[in-house]
Image (cartoon, rainbow, N blue to C red):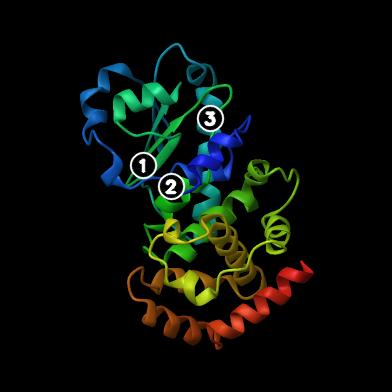
């Protein structure tokens, strides 16, 4: 993704939201499609209600695996409760002690990714990814595959709402919220119009990827906290990743105002929150 150089220049002690965002990938970039079957003998396996955790023996992962599972189960429940989602979907979570070993086995470069019912991550003393982001995508897709603005925005929003505000460490803004960082960046950069943001099929297609993630999360936060949550959940459940004109129509139908009004009201709220 476009943020890869930024990530290398500003390495975090513990990788948070944007550590995850920067390394997300499509299935087309994964060179060894059946890597998890071919290398099954390398992993130990621990199961919980919603996770099958696969890890390399004699690593930090093995020491922390029970605590890690407990946190993941909590994340799963929090996201499901928010989405009013009842599912027994089981996630296969693969944890590697180093990026190099993960690359050797999977053919994927980066710290992690999530696809279908699999999440793959590096886990060691210096790299521990956000628990919510990729899990959020998997559970959101149990309902629908919404436009990137809603999909990515909701995933980042969950990380802030339920997790730690760790994304801001990438930019050198400790203890800041998404809106805090967005306001700071707005002093230097223009916001993306909501029409342009809503039209994106993949958030990484944005000219300014960082702003696209931050704005998407802030817009989701605005919609969730200023209107009935049921309206937002309906928007997520009926919107289309492919049909932009339909999305404009359905948004106006649910919220009784258009995207231009949303943009004006959101910016006013952002400036005061």
The label number, if any, that marks residue 68 in the structure image: 3
Nearest to the observer: residue 153 or residue 72: 153
User: Which residue matches tag 2?
Assistant: 1
Location of residue 52 by image quarter: top left
**Mark 2 crowd level (few <14, some 14–19, many ≥20, 10 Å Cα):** few
- Give above or below for 185 relative to 224: above
Q: Secondary structure at mark 2?
A: loop
Q: CA distance from mark 3 to mark 1?
A: 16 Å
Give the side of residue 182 with respect to residue 126, left or right. right
Whether pointer 2 and pointer 1 mark residues with C-beta atoms closer than 8 Å, the reply is no
Q: Position of residue 57 (x, y in %)?
A: 41, 14
- Give above or below for 127 relative to 228: above
| Residue that extends furthest to the top in the rendered view of this protein | 58
Q: Nearer the viewer, mark 3 or mark 2?
A: 2
**Mark 1 crowd level (few <14, some 14–19, many ≥20, 10 Å Cα):** some
- Give above or below for 19 relative to 187: above
Location of residue 47 by image quarter: top left
Name the N-terminal-most of marks 2 and 1: 2
Quadrant showing the C terminus: bottom right
Residue 19 appears in the picture as rendered: no
Name the N-terminal-most of marks 3 and 2: 2
| Residue that extends furthest to the right in the rendered view of this protein | 272
Q: CA distance from mark 3 to mark 2?
A: 28 Å
Name the N-terminal-most of marks 3 and 1: 3
User: Which residue matches tag 1?
Assistant: 90
Location of residue 229 by image quarter: bottom right
Q: Position of residue 132 (x, y in %)?
A: 53, 45
């Amino acid at each position: 993704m476009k943020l890869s150089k930024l990530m290398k220049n500003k390495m975090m002690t513990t990788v948070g939201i944007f550590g995850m965002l920067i390394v997300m990938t499509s299935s087309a970039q994964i060179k060894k499609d059946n890597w998890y079957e071919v290398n099954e003998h390398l992993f130990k396996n621990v199961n919980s209600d919603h996770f099958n955790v696969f890890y390399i023996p004699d690593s930090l992962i093995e020491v922390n695996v029970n605590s890690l599972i407990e946190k993941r189960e909590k994340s799963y429940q929090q996201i499901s409760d928010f989405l009013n989602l009842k599912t027994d979907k089981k996630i296969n979570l693969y944890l590697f002690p180093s990026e190099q070993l993960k690359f050797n086995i999977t053919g994927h470069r980066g710290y992690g990714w999530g696809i279908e019912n699999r999440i793959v991550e590096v886990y060691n003393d210096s790299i521990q990814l956000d628990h919510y982001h990729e899990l959020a995508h998997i559970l959101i897709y149990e309902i629908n595959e919404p436009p990137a603005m809603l999909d990515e925005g909701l995933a980042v929003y969950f990380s802030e709402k339920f997790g730690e505000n760790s994304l801001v460490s990438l930019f050198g803004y400790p203890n800041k919220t998404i809106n805090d960082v967005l306001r700071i960046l707005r002093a230097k950069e223009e916001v993306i119009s909501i029409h342009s943001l809503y039209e994106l099929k993949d958030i990484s297609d944005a000219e300014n990827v960082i702003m696209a993630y931050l704005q998407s999360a802030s817009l989701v936060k605005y919609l969730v906290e200023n209107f009935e949550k049921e309206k937002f959940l309906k928007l997520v459940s009926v919107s289309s990743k492919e049909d932009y004109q339909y999305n404009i129509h359905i948004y106006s139908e649910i919220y009784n105002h258009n995207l231009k009004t949303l943009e004006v009201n959101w910016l006013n709220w952002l400036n005061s929150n």
